[in-house]
Image: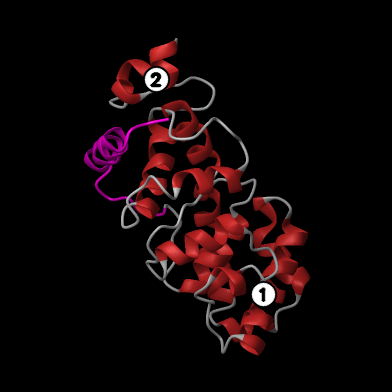
Amino acid sequence: MKSQQDVVAIVEALKELYPEGICSLDYPKPYELLFSVRLAAQCTDERVNMVTPALFARYPTLESLAEADVSEVESYIHSTGFFRAKARDIVAASRMMLEEFGGKVPNNMEDLLKLPGVGRKTANLILGDVYHTPGVVVADTHCIRISGKLGLTDGTKDPVKVEQQLRPILPPEESNDFCHRLVLHGRAVCMARKPDCANCTLRPWCDFFNKS
């Protein structure tokens, strides 16, 4: 496992590489981010960003989504895959937010996890991006893979364990943006199938590179 000095160095190196550590999903409203993350399951963010403008133009309010015909929602999100389950979750979650949470996206993990289709990864993303909660860790595939290669975790593929291992070592005010930067790095340099180690500035701290 890495020393705290190494962790800070990795955080700073990523900040220099990707100054804008932001989510790649487009959203003007908090609930739109929630549903965009749901749509991104087994789908690219690029595809989601192509689909959501028409979806949210057709249903411009949470109330309109709550009253939507699920089959019509399906037609807007068909290309994201698993569209039936996603459409059902979007409509059901809209109703629950209106009925139980005053039309707001919940601001705590316990309530977020009550929403249909919301798991820890989505909940952490909402807490970090919408509510700027310190210490959240969004353990997506890039985060899991790269943090394991760097030696920030023990290499586990379990998202909950990755979250538990990263939370204590990352500066709380940096953790959310750190996870976004790992996504950017995973797309640009540390690709899953063929990592471009020769052009990676994280080599000095990377267990994968230094053991290969």
Helix, strand or loop at label 2? It is: loop
**Which corner quadrant of the image does residue 185 belong to?**
top left
**Quadrant showing the C terminus:** top left
Front-most of residues 31 and 174: 174
Q: Amino acid at mark 1?
A: Ala
Q: Earlier in the sequence, mark 1 or mark 2?
A: 1
Viewed as shown, does residue 124 lie left or right of 181? Answer: right
Viewed as shown, does residue 95 lie left or right of 103? Answer: right
Residue 205 part of the magenta segment: no
Point 68% across, 63% down: residue: 117
Q: Which secondary structure dominates the residues rendered in magenta? A: helix
| Vertical position of residue 49 compared to residue 65: above or below | above
- Residue of label 2: 196
**Which corner quadrant of the image does residue 18 belong to?**
top left
Crowding around mark 2 (Cα neighbors within 10 Å: few <14, some 14 to 19, many 20+) is few
Residue 14 part of the magenta segment: yes
Point 72% across, 75% down: residue: 92
**Which corner quadrant of the image does residue 71 belong to?**
bottom right
Q: Amino acid at mark 2?
A: Asp
Q: Position of residue 63 (x, y in %)?
A: 61, 86
The magenta region covers: 1-23
Tell me the distance, in whole angstroms, between the alpha carbons under discs 1 and 2. Answer: 40 Å
- Residue of label 1: 93
Helix, strand or loop at label 1? It is: helix
| Vertical position of residue 111 compared to residue 188: above or below | below
Viewed as shown, does residue 129 lie left or right of 51? Answer: left
Front-most of residues 156 and 99: 156
Give the residue furthest to the top.
212
